[in-house]
Image (spheres, helix red, strand yellow):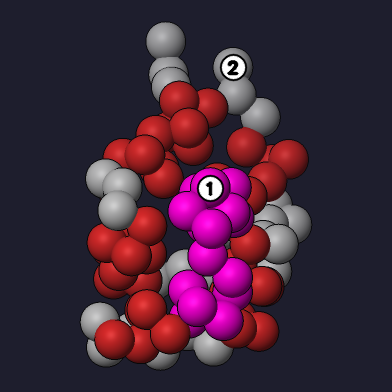
């Protein structure tokens, strides 16, 4: 049985995964924010920092834009999270 209550204080679970992928791609928060803005998604650097530290929620369209900028499938960002919640 999964204990979901341990995630109650997090506003998202994707943050650390996003941060790892961003660093792998060699993108600073500033550059990442700029690339998102080119797609029409305005996430300021301070908000990206908060997302990466589980202090801000992430909208579904933001996740899509983030995956485009990082050049990864959305499942690469969400897969590790969904595996935690498998019901047997």
Q: Which residue is mark 2?
A: 1
Specify whether residue 32 is in view: yes
**Label 1: few (<14), some or many (≥20) within 10 Å?**
few
Looking at the image, tell me whether mark 1 or mark 2 is earlier in sequence order: 2
Residue 35 at x, y = what percent? Answer: 37, 78
- Residue sitting at 30 percent across and 53 percent down? 71
Specify whether residue 13 is in view: no
Instruction: Tell me the quarter of the image containing the C terminus.
Output: top left
- Residue sitting at 58 percent across and 54 percent down? 23
Residue 6 at x, y = what percent? Answer: 73, 40
Is 26 in the magenta?
A: yes
- Residue sitting at 54 percent across and 58 percent down? 26
In-image side of 3 versus 57 (left or right): right
Residue 81 at x, y = what percent? Answer: 49, 37
User: In this orientation, which residue lies closer to the viewer: 11 or 20?
Assistant: 20
Instruction: Tell me the quarter of the image containing the N terminus.
Output: top right
Dominant secondary structure, magenta: helix
Question: What is the count of numbered marks?
Answer: 2
The CA distance from mark 1 to mark 2 is: 33 Å
> In the image, is residue 3 above or below residue 50?
above
Name the image quarter holding residue 2: top right
Q: Which residue is mark 1?
A: 24
Question: Helix, strand or loop at disc 2?
Answer: loop
Q: Which residues are magenta?
A: 19-33
> In the image, is residue 56 above or below residue 13?
below
**Label 2: few (<14), some or many (≥20) within 10 Å?**
few
In-image side of 1 versus 68 (left or right): right
């Amino acid at each position: 049985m999964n204990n979901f209550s341990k995630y109650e204080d997090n506003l998202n679970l994707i943050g650390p995964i996003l941060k790892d992928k961003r660093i792998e791609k060699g993108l600073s928060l500033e550059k990442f924010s700029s690339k998102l803005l080119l797609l029409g998604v305005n996430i300021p650097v301070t908000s990206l920092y908060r997302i990466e530290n589980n202090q801000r929620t992430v909208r579904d369209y933001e996740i899509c834009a983030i995956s485009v900028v990082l050049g990864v499938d959305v499942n690469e960002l969400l897969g590790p999270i969904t595996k935690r919640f498998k019901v047997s």
